[in-house]
Image (tube, grey):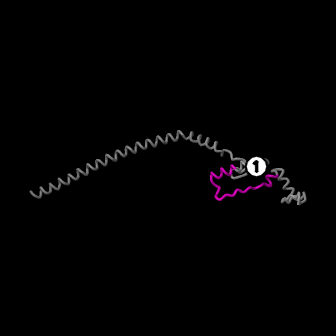
Amino acid sequence: MPGYRASFDDRNYLPKDVPANIGYAAAERGFGAARMNPDVLLVEANHDLRNSADLLVIDKIAKAIFAVEGISRVQVITRPDGKPIKHTSIPFMIGAQGSFMQLNQHYQQDRMADLLAQADEMQTSIDTMEQMTSTAAEMAETTHRLVAKTKSMVVDVDVA
């Protein structure tokens, strides 16, 4: 049929004074027809898209759709209210990370100094342990000589 346009909007077939049409018209004045009856686009993939790399791809798709003439809003996981979430752009995040690192720089330097002091104390402990090991070896050698002399004394006493 030439000129026929299929429509699935039931409001065209209902009287204007039906409460559903009155309510819909009031909502449409507040939100607009596109918000009341949005078009939905489904992106299908052979893997789970809930990771940072695929979220960037989804956001890129949303930007491309938003660039199409007549599109006023695109809602996706990266743009829940139709606009990019504040402070989530990569340049902002890199800048924020740099600021955070700069704020923590003094603290990190203090902790590094603490680690160096701890390493020095560990070296002192190692040196002390090495000295103790050397002393224990000398004591073992002295004890060995003492045992040998004691045995020779026993032999001398038995002989006499």
Among all residues in the image, which is located at the extreme left?
A: 160
Up the image or down, 39 lies above or below 102; here it is: below
Q: Which residue is mark 1?
A: 73
| Picture coordinates of residue 95, whole percent (x, y) | 61, 41
Please name the residue shown 51% across and 41% down the image.
108
Q: Which residues are magenta?
A: 33-60
In this image, 8 relative to 120: left or right?
Answer: right
At x 15%, y 57%, the residue is 154
Is-magenta flag for residue 41? yes
Quick check: is 11 in the magenta stretch? no
Rendered residue at 34%/47% (across/down): 129
Q: Amino acid at mark 1?
A: Arg
What residue appears at the point 12 percent right and 56 percent down from the top-left corner?
157
The 10 Å Cα crowd at callout 1, few under 14, some 14 to 19, many 20 or more, is some
Between 157 and 128, the residue placed more toward the observer is: 128
Residue 97 falls in which quadrant of the image?
Answer: top right
